[in-house]
Amino acid sequence: MKRLREAFPGLIVCALLASAALMSAESPLLRDTLHLSALLLVILAGMALTSFMRLPAWTLPGIRVAQRPLLRWAVAGLGFRLSLGEIARIGAPALAVVVVSTGAALWFGWWVARRLGVSEKLALLLGVGGAICGASAVVAADSVVQAEKRDSAVALGVITLLGTVGIVIYPWIGRALGMGDFAFGLWDGATLHEMAQVVAAASGYSEQAKSVATVVKLTRITLLAPVVFALAWWLRQRGGAGEARVSAVPWFLVMFVVFAGVNSSGLVPAPWLDAIRRADLWLLCVGMAGVGLQTGFHDLKAAGWAPIAAGAAQWAFLAVAALAMARLVGL
């Protein structure tokens, strides 16, 4: 009870920021014109607050709770967005494109970041976030990587910047290359970072492209659990004395798989699922507020150009690899 009382004020601050971001993201300007998601808005708001004012000490326990256990529950809740039936309907060739290109991008992202002098932990966060599902993947990976708090904010900032550029240029590239609706949806969903960015880019192409892109993106999200499980195992294998212990089976990823199974079963009524998903989005925003409030804009500036260059190189590699594979298998 004492710990709960200590965390309560900071959690209220994070909850207020999350609620404000969700309401703001519904405005036509931010949703339809600028394509800014609530997750991005709440991170920016948190970073702005901590950059221009000193947070009272009484907020810190709650901010840490939002950033860690609450955010991990929110990531687990993403399982309620996954349906194995929908994923199966896109076909084996498309699934192969997603899995192989994502795996290749994971390795390349880490490799190029290390060649550019990025620290290993930040390189891992950039690699997982850029290859799979942006902010949620960064948070999940950070639970086992245990990077500095600045590293997760830098990774989130790089992914947000690049994904926003993708919203603008993807429809133009698709039309320039003469892509059909299915091909563009596959390419968009297999390579762009955040779900909101994927949907925004595909919306500028066609309704069919948006439907395909959404399912392909969800397919990428299913790779989150096995990738982070593998990352936890790898870090445990190479860990030395004095290093933080890494759980071989992160509990929130177990729940992610359980929730995906429940969603795929069809036993939960649609109105309940909609309410669960909205609650999970709010919880994600609360957790992201904790991330933003732990990092200022000066931390991003101090990181330099190397993380941006590494993220851009990984994105270009993934985009070219997915497009080449799609054409190779006749998609």
Image: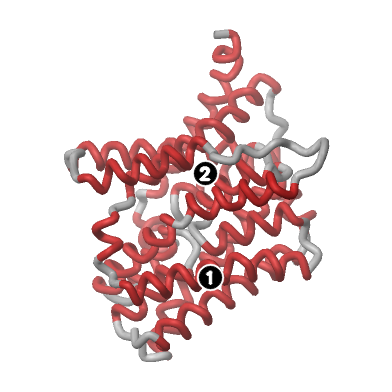
Q: Are marks 2 and 1 in contact (CB under 8 Å)?
A: no
Q: Would you say residue 35 is visible in this rendering?
A: no
Q: Is 40 on the left or on the right of 152, as rendered?
A: left
Q: Amino acid at mark 1?
A: Val
Q: Amino acid at mark 2?
A: Val
Q: Which mark is residue 165?
A: 1
Q: Residue at x 30, y 73 (%)?
A: 209
Near mark 2 (Cα within 10 A), the count class, few <14, some 14-19 or many ≥20, is: many
Q: Measured from the top left, where is residue 162 in percent x and y?
A: 57, 67
- When asked about the image quadrant of residue 328, the answer is bottom left
Between 315 and 223, the one nearer to me in the picture: 223
Cα gap from disc 2 to disc 1, whole angstroms:
19 Å
Q: Residue at x 54, y 64 (%)?
A: 131
Callout 1 secondary element = helix
Q: Measured from the top left, where is residue 214 in percent x and y?
A: 33, 63
Q: Which mark is residue 42?
A: 2
- Name the image quarter holding the N terminus: top right
Callout 2 secondary element = helix
Q: Measured from the top left, where is residue 205 in percent x and y?
A: 33, 77
